[in-house]
Amino acid sequence: MKTANKAQSPGSKNRIGFWSAVLTTVLTVISFSIAINGTPLNSYAYPYIAPFIPFDFAWLIPALILMPTFVALTASIHYYAPNERKIFSQIALSFAIVCAVLLMADYFIQLTVVLPSTLSGETAGLSLFTEYNPHGMFVSLEVLGFLMMSAAFLFLAPIFDKGRLQQSIRWLFVASFILAVSSVVGLSTAGYDIVYSEVAIISITWIVLIVSGILLAVLFRRTAKMPQG
C-alpha cells in the first residue's frame, strides 16, 4: 500500500509536469528555429515537388516528438487541477490528444511517404500531400491540429486563477485561443490561401508553448517544493 501511495504522490506528478513542461519548451524552440530557416513554401510551383533538402524536413522530427510531450504536459495539468475544475482539464486533454493524433500523422506521412517518394522519383500524385503545397493536405491538417491545440489552451485556462504566475498562464492561454481562431477566420474570410492561416496559427501556438512551458515548469517546481499535508 505504501508503494502505491508513493507512486501516486503529488511529488511524482509535479516532477512529471516539470519535465514535460521543460521538454515542451526545448522541443518547440528547436522545431521553430529549424522551421523558420527552411525553404519558403512559395519557392516551389506546381506540382510542389522540391528537390531533396534534408534541412527542410529536419524540423518535423522534434515537432513529431513534441506532440506526445504536449499530451503528457496536459495530463499533468489535469492531475494538478482541483477536483471541481477537472472537467475543464479533461476536455483540454481530449483536445490535446486529437491535436497530437492529427499532427503526428501529418508529420509522419511527410517523413515516411513524401520524403522517400521524392528521393525515389516516385512523385506521381504526390503534390496533394507535400508540405510545399500552399493549399495541400499537409497545411490543412496542420491548421486543424493547431486549432485543436488552441482549444486545449482555452479549456486549461480556468485551472489557473491563484497568484500572478497562474494568472499569467491563464490569460496567455485565453489570448492564444482568441488570436489563433481570429487569424484563421480573418485570413480565410479575406480570401488568402490556407497556408497564411497555417503560418499565423503555428507561430502563435509555438510562441505560447515556449512561454507557457517556462511558466508551467516554474509552477510545477514551486508546487513540488511546497510541504505536503
Image (spheres, rainbow, N blue to C red):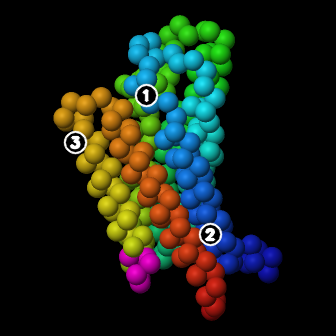
Is 199 magenta? The answer is no
Spatial CA span between label 1 and label 3: 21 Å
Residue 175 shows in this picture: yes
Nearer to us in this view, 188 or 48: 48
Give the magenta-colored segment's residue range. 162-167
> Few, some or many C-alpha atoms within 10 Å of disc 1 (few <14, some 14-19, many ≥20)?
some
Of the two numbered discs 1 and 2 in the rendering, the one whose residue sits closer to the viewer = 1
Q: Main secondary structure of the magenta part?
A: helix
Q: Residue at x 29, y 55 (%)?
A: 178
Query: Which residue carries the number 1 mark?
Result: 41
Quarter the N terminus occupies: bottom right
Would you say 189 lies left or right of 200 here? left
Tag 3 or tag 2, which sits nearer the N-term? Answer: 2
Spatial CA span between label 1 and label 2: 36 Å
User: Which amino acid type is shown beneath numbered disc 3?
Assistant: Gly
Q: Secondary structure at mark 3?
A: helix
Q: Position of residue 198 (x, y in %)?
A: 38, 38
Would you say 96 lies left or right of 151 here? right
Q: Residue at x 24, y 38 (%)?
A: 187
- Location of residue 170 with respect to 52 vertically, above or below: below
Spatial CA span between label 2 and label 3: 36 Å
Of the two numbered discs 1 and 3 in the rendering, the one whose residue sits closer to the viewer = 1
Q: Residue at x 62, y 36 (%)?
A: 58
Quarter the C terminus occupies: bottom right
Q: Position of residue 36 (x, y in %)?
A: 49, 41
Tag 2 or tag 1, which sits nearer the N-term? Answer: 2
Q: Which mark is residue 210?
A: none
Query: Which residue carries the number 2 mark?
Result: 18
Query: Which residue carries the number 3 mark?
Result: 186
